[in-house]
Amino acid sequence: MPITVTDTQKTALQALDTQMDIGFSSGVSGSSGYGLDGFTGWDGLTTEIHTTVKASYSVFFAAVLQALDPLLGGVVTNFEVPLVYKGETGITAHAGGGQGSATPLTAEVNFVTAVGSTGDSVRLPAPVLGARIVVFTNDPGIGDPSLAIFPASGHSIDGLGANNAYSLANNNSREFWGQSATAWRSR
């Protein structure tokens, strides 16, 4: 998609290029491993940006492009690199269960690897519309205990009512999507 780069946008990108030594302006079209395919350099104010991000800068550069997207007019949206989510492994569910003392889930992708008995618990953060939390459970050392996943205090999961737990069987996963400021929806 061709875009017109304004002088202000050009200046911002050049400053970023200089500061981060990314190499927008040298050896682009994939040969340098740093640039964007199709970027024709600073002298061409009309540029086609194919958001193919290259080499070791890929994840970092994808984040930079996403941050610059409003400045570029909302055209940098379809990345070919995978998004990287904050993940946490080795989570131990709170023994004995309960919402107030449940182990809080602080990442977007959570691997609960220690569930001593059915009902041991973890707690989702307060929901935000569109937020996504994924929970995996796998405790190989003990039969099939179910994990109790609680919402934050005063919130609900799947219409189960405020403060009630969702039960997730061992060796399973579940996605929780923020449906509103007070409710999670799972699938």
Image (spheres, rainbow, N blue to C red):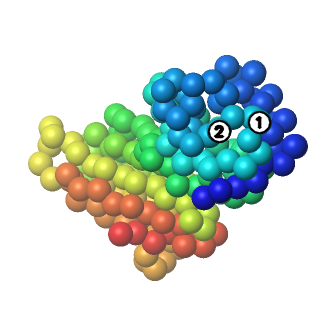
* Amino acid identity at mark 2: Thr
- Relative image position of residue 35 (x, y in whole percent): 57, 32
116 or 45, nearer to the observer: 45
Residue at the image position 49 percent from the left and 59 percent from the top: 132
Residue at the image position 40 percent from the left and 69 percent from the top: 186
Give the quadrant of the N terminus.
bottom right
77 or 8, nearer to the observer: 8
- Relative image position of residue 55 (x, y in whole percent): 46, 27
Tell me if residue 174 comes above or below residue 41 in the rendering.
below
181 or 151, nearer to the observer: 181
Instruction: Tell me if 68 is positioned left or right of 80 in this view.
Output: right
- Callout 2 secondary element: loop
Q: Residue furthest left?
A: 143
Give the quadrant of the C terminus.
bottom left
Name the residue carrying label 1. 43
How packed is label 1: few (under 14 Cα within 10 Å), some, or many (20 or more)?
few
* Amino acid identity at mark 1: Asp
Tell me if residue 62 comes above or below residue 75 in the rendering.
above
Residue at the image position 40 percent from the left and 54 percent from the top: 134
- State the mark number for residue 40: 2
Instruction: Tell me if 173 is positioned left or right of 140 in this view.
Output: right
Instruction: Tell me if 41 is positioned left or right of 29 in this view.
Output: right
**Residues at circles 2 and 1 in contact by the CB criterion of under 8 Å:** yes
- The quadrant in which residue 73 appears is bottom right
Q: CA distance from mark 2 to mark 1?
A: 8 Å
